[in-house]
Amino acid sequence: MARAIAGDQAAYGELVVRYTALAHRTAYLLGAGADAGDVVQEAFVKAYRKLGTFKEGLDFKPWLLKIVANETKNLHRGRRRRNLMELKLAAVTETVDHDDPGTLVDDSRAKLLKAVQSLPEHDRQVVTCRYLLDLSEAETAQTLNLAKGTVKSRLSRALAKLRPMLEEVAHDR
């Protein structure tokens, strides 16, 4: 990290190689879907531009994932605006299917992902970071720019919402 901050592009390239898959998975699971690659590319560009703001002693992973989460939020905002404009222009009320589980072929995994996707965005983000990306509470807090206590309380509420849905999945087996 120190070499990258000092301007060593090869060192930054090593960080990109090391964290691209995790960043892509994060973007996808936070709702970027097919646009995850674009989100990740933009996140790495922004991270490179902001290397001077990186605080020594911090871990690169949650810092980068925070940028990925913010880029995914930006994508959602843009999608909402475009979707509203399309609806107004077409004067048609269509629903867009965002429940595609992608490459997950296992039915119970697809149902789990669908249950997580049905949560409100703030709940979905903490569950995704903590359990699907296996980040610690501290990393989740840093990634989402939240207090650790906020992460704990949101996780508790989100899991309470998920529990009935997951019991339904377990009974379907």
Image: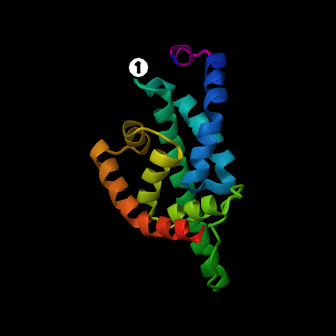
* Label 1 environment density (alpha carbons within 10 Å; few <14, some 14–19, many ≥20): few
Q: Position of residue 112 (x, y in %)?
A: 56, 61
Kindly tell me whether residue 70 is visible in this rendering.
no
**What residue do we see at 67% from left, 82% from top?**
90
Image coordinates for residue 98, horizontal then vertical, percent: 62, 67
Residue 136 as seen in the image, left or right of residue 50: left
Name the image quarter holding the C terminus: bottom right
Q: Is residue 50 magenta?
A: no
Q: Which residue is mark 1?
A: 56
Q: Residue at x 65, y 37 (%)?
A: 21
At mark 1, the secondary structure is loop
Q: Height in image: 88 above or below 39?
A: below
Q: Position of residue 132 (x, y in %)?
A: 53, 48
> Based on the displayed image, in which of its 4 quarters is residue 139 positioned?
top left
Q: Is residue 148 above or below residue 81?
A: above
Q: Is residue 103 above or below residue 133?
A: below
- Asked where in the image residue 82 lies, by quadrant, the reply is bottom right
Left or right of residue 23: residue 55: left
> Residue 47, position in %: x, y?
54, 33
Of residue 59 and residue 80, the one placed in the foreground of this image is 59
Q: Residue at x 51, y 67 (%)?
A: 118
Colour convention: rainbow
Residue type, label 1 = Glu
Instruction: Tell me the magenta residue range.
Output: 2-8
